[in-house]
Image (cartoon, rainbow, N blue to C red):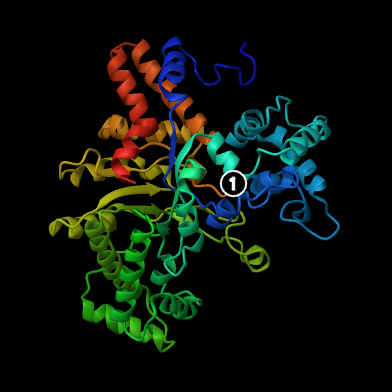
Amino acid sequence: MKAFMDHDFMLNNETAKQLYRDYAAGMPIIDYHCHLSQQEIYENRSYANLTEVWLYGDHYKWRAMRANGVEEKYITGGEGVSDYDRFLAYARTVPMTVGNPLYHWSHLELRRLFGIEELINERNAPVIWEKANAKLQGGGFSVQDFIRGAGVEVVCTTDDPADSLEHHRLLAEQEAELGFRVLPSFRPDKALEINRPAFLGYLEKLGESADRELASYDDLLHALEARARFFHAVGGRVSDHALDYVPWAETTHEEAALIYEKALLGNGVTPEEERKYKTYTLLFLGRLYAELGWSMQYHMNAHRNNNARRLASLGVDTGFDSIGDSPVAVALVRLLDRLDADDQLPRTIVYSLNPSDNNVLAALIGSFQGGGIPGKIQLGAAWWFNDTKDGMLEQLKSLGNMGLLPRFVGMLTDSRSFLSYTRHEYFRRIFCNLLGEWVEQGEAPNDPELLREIVQGVCYNNAKAYFRF
């Protein structure tokens, strides 16, 4: 019987152990998609206690606590509830997460970042609390310390087009001192969600940032282009879109403009009109990204804000989302094909939150490779509900079966937590174990040079070449 999370954790064959130790463990990290705060990075936030850094804003942990019967006030905070109360509620929950990656992640975070080896449970909670807080209050445990300590080279935050990027610009001035880069990602979702109540208010904000009134659809497109070019000047090289469903409808510029004008008047936009508006706008943006030399990301098939009562009381991104099951193939093929027809398809990464789409997407991307760019169209990393051991293996195997796994740009955190870089270790161990299995079973050659190229490519080198930060 192996010890829990020992030195060879998840490395179940000798080749895997060698691949991880010799080639993977020491590679830098390019975190090309996350939800970390640019302001907190610039201000180098420090934390008063473990709850602040470990539980605030982490909806992965919040979901587990709710499933364990923890009252909401101990999860998102409430009157008379201390941070220790909240920590204790999670410590009681962790033993019930066996089988969930949270069990591994939580222990990895404490072990790698705080040197705390105790199992997380109610009995050990006081010791863990005291040890972690002593570290946090002793220096060397601020946000920038966590990033440097994890070997992170680039962090790409997720930013709205209307954002001033004030802290990104300040961080760029400190790059040599920091030892890592913090770059913006362009996330124009609010400009596409024409049917949401906040759409008109958002247009005012976007117009202010672009110094123009968005009185017409052309005004909107000009504003989006201006903001994208501003992001580019600040170092942005990545866009991202949350497509809860993939829109497609044949339309024209004139028709999209009329739909926009209808929305400005406060008149309802039909589902078909929404698809037309989104289709034309996405095509416009895709061509712009190609011109700028950016990489475009489509995150698809999330089913968001399922619980209306909790949405009203807690807001978005609080743990009440799930996996969607909308079809992706037909609409996505048409979007990519229309861009490719004019040779204006940018580097593109496609992710689906529904693992049933893995093979669909792995096959689909093969239709649009080319341009002399290795892995130009990527099957994105196992994401959100899929960044489990099984989810990662399914994604890796789908890509290996239908594409070129050695060209994969690797893992990302997709996280709001500065402790989440241990997920890269988790992924690297799983990947090395899979590759090691193939070698030991005679399905891949025991060629050290080839294996080193593959492992270091997937862990770091491919992302470095692909994104060209």
Residue 90, compared with residue 242, is above or below; it is: above
Q: Position of residue 213 (x, y in %)?
A: 38, 85
- Decide which of 121, 325 is in the foreground and name it: 121
In the picture shown, does residue 97 fall above or below 308?
Answer: above
In this rendered view, identify the residue nearer to me: 389 or 161.
Answer: 161
**Left of 362 or right of it: where is 178?**
right
**10 Å neighbourhood of mark 1: few (<14), some, or many (≥20)?**
many
Give the tally of numbered discs: 1
Q: Residue furthest right?
A: 80
In the image, what residue occupies the spot 42% across and 22% down? 432
Amino acid found under the numbered disc labelled 1? Ser
SS of the residue under disc 1: loop
- Residue, far bottom: 265
Q: Which residue is mark 1?
A: 417
- Can see residue 318? yes
In this image, 219 relative to 208: left or right?
A: left
Q: Residue 222 in the image: x percent, y percent?
A: 30, 75
Where, by quadrant of the figure, is residue 98 drawn? Answer: top right
Quadrant, the N terminus? top right
Q: Is residue 443 above or below residue 67?
A: above
> Which residue does the image show at 39% across and 43% down from the upper left?
356
- Furthest toward the left, the residue is 342
Residue displayed at 67% across by 44% down: 54
Please indicate, yes or no, whether residue 396 appears anywhere in the rendered image. Answer: no
Horizontal and vertical percent for residue 444?
29, 16
- The location of residue 275, given as percent across then percent down, is 32, 70
